[in-house]
Amino acid sequence: MDIFSNEDQERVVQAISVAENMTSGELRLVVERRLEASSALDAAVAYFQQLGMHKTTLKNGVLIYLALDDHAFAIIGDTGINEKVPENFWEATKEEMASFFRRGEIVEGLIAGIHHAGEQLQHFYPKRPDDVNELPNDIYFGNR
């Protein structure tokens, strides 16, 4: 899917790697053109299951979902994260991303959000010496 240039994809994947080096948490990014679900949150939940993110050892996966043409996005975390963090935990990350998105800086917004999520996860799930990367760091481009 020709949403981002190769260079932009590399920058985003690098941001995921850097964020995951701060935490044992697992980050995934799903990008698609159009929102097919009733909401970005519903799409994020569906992709979370589809990509097997609920299978991480510590239940500390985070998915960022973006429907580019519909200007919709969501961030969700697995049960292990949700048990430890306040209810509005992702609001600061979402607002930081939205500030870039409003200026049309999509890639920069994703990178900022990924970095912020990694910093936040580090407090609850610091990197462990025996940490294993359980999920791919690439961008998953939705098939819708």
Image: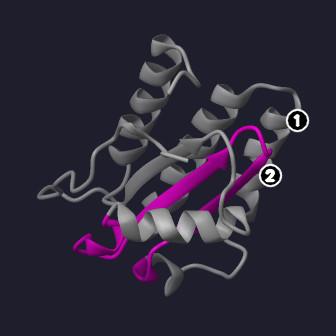
Residue at disc 1, secondary structure: helix
In the picture of the structure, the residue carrying the numbered disc 1 is 102
- Write down the quadrant of residue 18 in the picture: top left
Front: mark 2 or 1: 1
Task: Please tell me whether residue 55 belongs to the stretch shown in magenta.
Answer: yes
Residue situated in front as seen by the camera: 28 or 3: 3
Mark 2 surroundings within 10 Å by alpha-carbon count, few (fewer than 14), some (14 through 19), many (20 or more): few
Q: How many marks?
A: 2
Q: Amino acid at mark 1?
A: Arg
In the picture of the structure, the residue carrying the numbered disc 2 is 95
Q: How is the image coloured?
A: one colour
The spot of residue 119 in percent (x, y) is 52, 51
Q: Amino acid at mark 2?
A: Glu
Residue situated in front as seen by the camera: 141 or 105: 141
Q: Which residues are magenta?
A: 52-80
- Write down the quadrant of residue 40 in the picture: bottom right
**Residue 72 visible in the shown view:** yes
CB contact under 8 Å: marks 2 and 1: no
Upstream in the sequence, badge 2 or badge 1? Answer: 2
Residue at disc 2, secondary structure: helix
The spot of residue 106 in percent (x, y) is 71, 30
| Residue found at the far bottom of this picture | 83
